[in-house]
């Protein structure tokens, strides 16, 4: 699948205000500064569809993009570090969890993880939350171009082993780079397969 058109629809502060439709939604989420916006721009072939920022925690709203008039790509606020107050962080966390648990149109959540780091506590906790609540998700390792192939493989393997301590089966896993385009086709093929399966 190649995306021919992707347009911004709207931003919302609450899941209940999100667009009313019956199309599948694929949401992207991850810790602040994981490269979420850059990856969204890469797979949609647009440089500025999702706003990128060097300041972690910039995405504070639920952003909907309509792709090829068929499905929605949803850019969710990052979790973890953000330059906001504790009460603001709590509200942000609630916003994310409400969308993930309540949004019926959500068919898959892509959880982005920075491939340069060892397993992070807030990533593992969020993945555990998804598993406990039966939310369909995939893991997307980002910034694969930032480290050697052997180090990348070692980090991904470490993450898999850590997850297998709690999980009997791992979710689909993708390795990507918004710089080189690594993993872009695999992600789009996976999205296409889900759309066909529910069509």
Image (cartoon, helix red, strand yellow):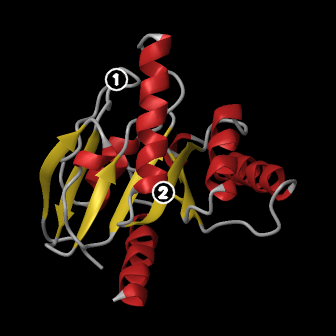
Q: Tally the numbered discs.
A: 2
Q: Mark 2 sits on what residue?
A: 110
Asked whether residue 33 is in view, the answer is no
| Quadrant for the C terminus in the image | bottom left
- Give the class, few, some or many, for how many residues have Cα within 10 Å of label 1's Cα (few <14, many ≥20): few
Q: Mark 1 sits on what residue?
A: 54
Compared with 140, 113 (above or below) is above
* Residue 52 x %, y %: 27, 34
Secondary element at image label 1? loop
- x 51%, y 35%: residue: 31
- x 47%, y 58%: residue: 109
Q: Is residue 163 left or right of residue 178?
A: right
* Residue 74 x %, y %: 31, 53
Task: Work out whether mark 2 precedes mark 1 in sequence or the reverse, and give the earlier one.
Answer: 1
* Residue 54 x %, y %: 34, 23
Q: Is residue 29 left or right of residue 130?
A: left
């Amino acid at each position: 699948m190649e995306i021919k058109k992707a347009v911004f629809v709207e931003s919302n502060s609450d899941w209940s205000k999100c667009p009313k439709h019956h199309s599948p939604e694929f949401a992207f989420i991850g810790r602040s500064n994981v490269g979420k916006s850059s990856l969204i721009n890469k797979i949609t072939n647009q440089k500025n569809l999702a706003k990128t920022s060097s300041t972690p925690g910039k995405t504070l709203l639920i952003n909907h993009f309509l792709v090829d008039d068929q499905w929605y790509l949803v850019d969710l606020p990052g979790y973890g570090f953000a330059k906001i107050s504790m009460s603001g962080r709590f509200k942000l966390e609630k916003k994310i969890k409400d969308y993930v648990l309540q949004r019926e149109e959500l068919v898959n959540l892509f959880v982005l993880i920075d491939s340069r780091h060892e397993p992070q506590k807030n990533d593992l906790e969020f993945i555990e939350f998804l598993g406990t609540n039966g939310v369909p998700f995939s893991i997307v390792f980002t910034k694969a171009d930032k480290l050697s192939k052997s180090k990348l493989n070692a980090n991904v393997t470490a993450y898999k082993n850590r997850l297998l301590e709690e999980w009997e089966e791992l979710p689909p896993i993708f390795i990507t780079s918004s710089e080189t385009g690594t993993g872009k086709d695999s992600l789009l093929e996976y999205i296409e397969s889900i759309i066909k399966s529910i069509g």
